[in-house]
Image (tube, helix red, strand yellow):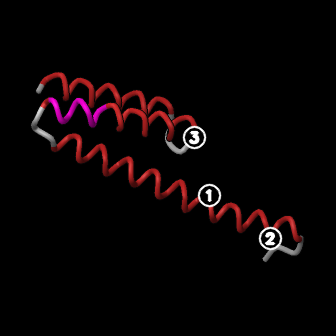
């Protein structure tokens, strides 16, 4: 256990950040899964913009790697355009 006041605060803030990152990552993964399941092109196109925005935010905050975000965006765009 930490002995310094600043170390205790760092533990608390790390836990809060970990939970927030976990929530955002899980929400984005669910959105990607839902987008892949959509069969209607117009609905998929509207949802694609929101999912791409979510992926960009995760990559910007280093929750996921920037190349993973780019690969996911590429795959999803290809799938939506193929509908």
Task: Name the spot of residue 35 as percent of width and height, x first.
Answer: 23, 41
Residue 60: quadrant of the picture: top right
Camera-nearest residue between 11 and 83: 83
The quarter of the picture where the C terminus appears is top left
Marks 2 and 1, the one that precedes in the sequence: 2
Q: Vertically, is 66 above or below 21?
A: above
Q: CA distance from mark 1 to mark 3?
A: 12 Å
Q: Residues within 10 Å of mark 2 (few under 14, many from 20)?
A: few
Looking at the rendered structure, which numbered label has been put on residue 17?
A: 1
Say whether residue 38 is left or right of residue 67: left
Tell me, yes or no, whether the highlighted magenta stretch contains residue 44. Answer: yes
The secondary structure that dominates the magenta segment is helix
Say whether residue 24 is left or right of residue 28: right
The residue to which callout 3 is attached is 62
Assign a secondary structure to mark 1: helix
The residue to which callout 2 is attached is 8
Marks 2 and 3, the one that precedes in the sequence: 2
Q: Are marks 2 and 3 in contact (CB under 8 Å)?
A: no
**Residue in the image at 77% along x and 62% along y:** 10
Task: Name the spot of residue 13 as percent of width and height, x first.
Answer: 70, 62
Residue range (magenta): 42-48
**Residue in the image at 23% along x and 29% along y:** 45
Say whether residue 10 is left or right of residue 41: right
């Amino acid at each position: 256990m930490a002995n310094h006041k600043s170390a205790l605060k760092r533990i608390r803030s790390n836990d809060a950040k970990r939970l927030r990152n976990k929530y955002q990552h899980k929400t984005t993964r669910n959105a990607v899964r839902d987008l892949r399941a959509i069969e209607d092109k117009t609905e998929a196109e509207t949802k694609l913009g929101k999912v791409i925005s979510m992926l960009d935010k995760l990559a910007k905050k280093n929750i996921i790697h920037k190349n993973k975000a780019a690969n996911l965006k590429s795959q999803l765009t290809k799938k939506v355009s193929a509908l």
